[in-house]
Amino acid sequence: MTDTAIEMTADLVRDLLREQHPDLAGLAVREVAGGWGNQMWRLGDELAVRVQRMDPTPELQLKERRWLPVLAPRLPLPVPTPVRFGEPSELFAKHWTVMTWVPGEPLDHGSISRGTHAADTLAGFLQALHVQAPAEAPIATDRGAHPRNCTDGFEDFLRAVAPAGIAADVRAVRDVWDEAVTADAWEGPPVWVHGDLHPANVVVSDGTLSGIVDFGDLFAGDPAWDLAAAWVLLPAGTAARFFDTYAHADEAAIRRARGLAAMKCLFLMLMGQNGDQGLPGGKPHWGPAGRAALDRVLKGV
């Protein structure tokens, strides 16, 4: 059976539940829009089924299974927690996991109106997450490095986006990146890092952050990769409040975070361009979100 031979449907999700977790098979199943590496299906009101889709290996799901139950109890915001494991079978040759559902609306389809509250909430969440990780914690393979070691990726994104999206700001973006590249490296112990905080991986309700999702890129390393969210996620004018509340970021960490935020914004804009062109995985609504976030990065607010 090839990866493309099976189309995931609500009926197939229910069949998988009947096969491996029959006590859950009677709950309503409905698809959740979005997702790329994994596809989500609501399961009743309180659960979700996370199905491996484009991810070539089950590594990210297995990582969430191993570490989210350890982290979730000490985090101040809801996060998805695995409750049942689905293994490859003749019905479906990939992994899937039943997890708790985090209520709210993804930020890429919502907005933050209570900026100060959101800044304090995000800072409190990252304070709780960014503690020393154990020796057996996963190490990042494609992120987590000092910005100086990510310059090829930054340049690729910049070349792809600049002609259509930021021609007038290329020099300013490079200046922010150069500041990050020359910043001192993280010298503390490796801490837990979410690693992929962008608008589709946080949820909002009542005008503020209310949950964090998708921990597939979780790793132990430099917290600056998460601190970039001060600009990528929060409204203009709240980055300073975030860093004041977080209270553990020195000047070098903020410089690294701002450069990484610029790179993340370019990625969002590239995904938006891909969506405008109808390319697989493209998301048209990410383009404006990335451009707005890049404006915040360049202004430093």
Image (tube, grey):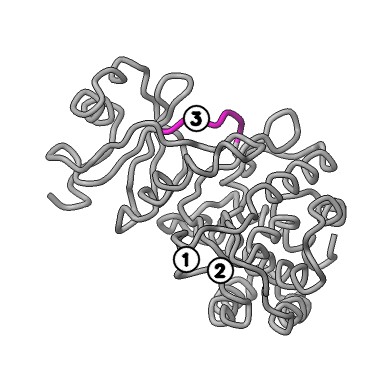
69 in the magenta segment? no
Residue 257's x, y, as percent? 71, 67
Q: Is mark 2 on a helix, strand or loop?
A: loop
Please state which amino acid type lies under the numbered disc 3.
Trp
Q: In which quarter of the image is residue 118?
A: top right
Mark count: 3
Label 1 and label 2: CA atoms lie apart by 8 Å
Q: Are marks 1 and 2 in contact (CB under 8 Å)?
A: yes
Reading the image, the residue beneath label 3 is 101
Identify the mark at residue 144; answer none if there is no mark.
2
Reading the image, the residue beneath label 1 is 139
Please state which amino acid type lies under the numbered disc 1.
Ile
Residue 300's x, y, as percent? 84, 65
Question: Foreground residue, 256 or 264?
Answer: 256
Label 3 environment density (alpha carbons within 10 Å; few <14, some 14–19, many ≥20): many
Q: What element carries label 3?
A: loop
Question: If you read the primary sequence from the N terminus, does the residue marked by circle 3 or circle 1 appear first?
Answer: 3
Label 1 environment density (alpha carbons within 10 Å; few <14, some 14–19, many ≥20): some
Please state which amino acid type lies under the numbered disc 2.
Gly
Query: Of circles 3 and 2, which is in front?
Result: 2
Q: What stretch is highlighted in magenta?
A: 99-105
